[in-house]
Amino acid sequence: MKKNLIILIVVSLLIIGGGSYYLLNKTRANIQTTTAPTPQQPTSNVEIRDGIQYVTISAKNGYSPKTSSAKADIPTKLIVKTNGTFDCSASFVIKQLSFHKILQPTGEEIIDIGTFKNSEKLRGTCSMGMYNFIVTFE
């Protein structure tokens, strides 16, 4: 009787442990598949309308995408979108343009950044320098 009880307890623990392991790994797999795109994946945040190029960046818990490629020698505007942004990324800075603005928590800021030559880069950060993004012109 005592031997059967011990076997029952061991088997129960193995079943519970195996089920827990399975669920934990399934949760990790779901988290990994729902992360943001990697920098190598193409982004569709650049479009040209009526001869003006628009580069769209989201500002919330940093800037997304962190890297963008845009065409050189085209007048360009940067669109910075916020949606419930109450972190440091709301304090938006582009040093090379002497631009600094506290963004509204939700909305859009359209910034005329002019025309960049081939191989030039536009860098933006939050005021603390924690978050950043780069637009490379090609």
Image (cartoon, grey):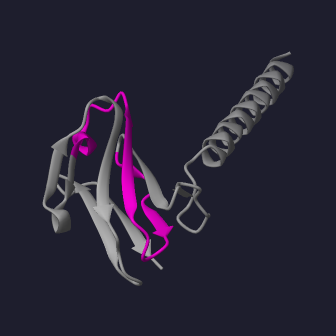
When the figure is inspected, residue 17 is found, relative to residue 28, above or below; the finding is above
Q: Residue furthest bottom?
A: 119
Q: Is residue 27 magenta?
A: no
Q: Quadrant of residue 15?
A: top right
Please give the name of the residue rendered at 44% of the width and 70% of the height, measured from the top-left corner. 74
Please give the name of the residue rendered at 58% of the width and 69% of the height, measured from the top-left corner. 40
The range drawn in magenta is 62-91
The location of residue 28, given as percent across then percent down, is: 63, 43
Which residue is more in the foreground, 96 or 28? 96
Q: Residue furthest front?
A: 50
Residue 93 located left or right of residue 106 = left
When the figure is inspected, residue 121 is found, relative to residue 1, above or below; the finding is below
Which residue is more in the foreground, 13 or 128? 128
Residue 133 located left or right of residue 96 = right
Q: Could one spot residue 59 in this view of the protein?
A: no
Q: Is residue 74 magenta?
A: yes
Please give the name of the residue rendered at 24% of the width and 37% of the height, measured from the top-left corner. 103
When the figure is inspected, residue 118 is found, relative to residue 2, above or below; the finding is below
The location of residue 34, given as percent across then percent down, is: 62, 43
Q: Could one spot residue 7 in this view of the protein?
A: yes
Quarter of the image that includes the N terminus: top right
The location of residue 76, given as percent across then percent down, is: 39, 62
Q: Residue furthest top?
A: 1
The location of residue 100, given as percent across then percent down, is: 15, 50
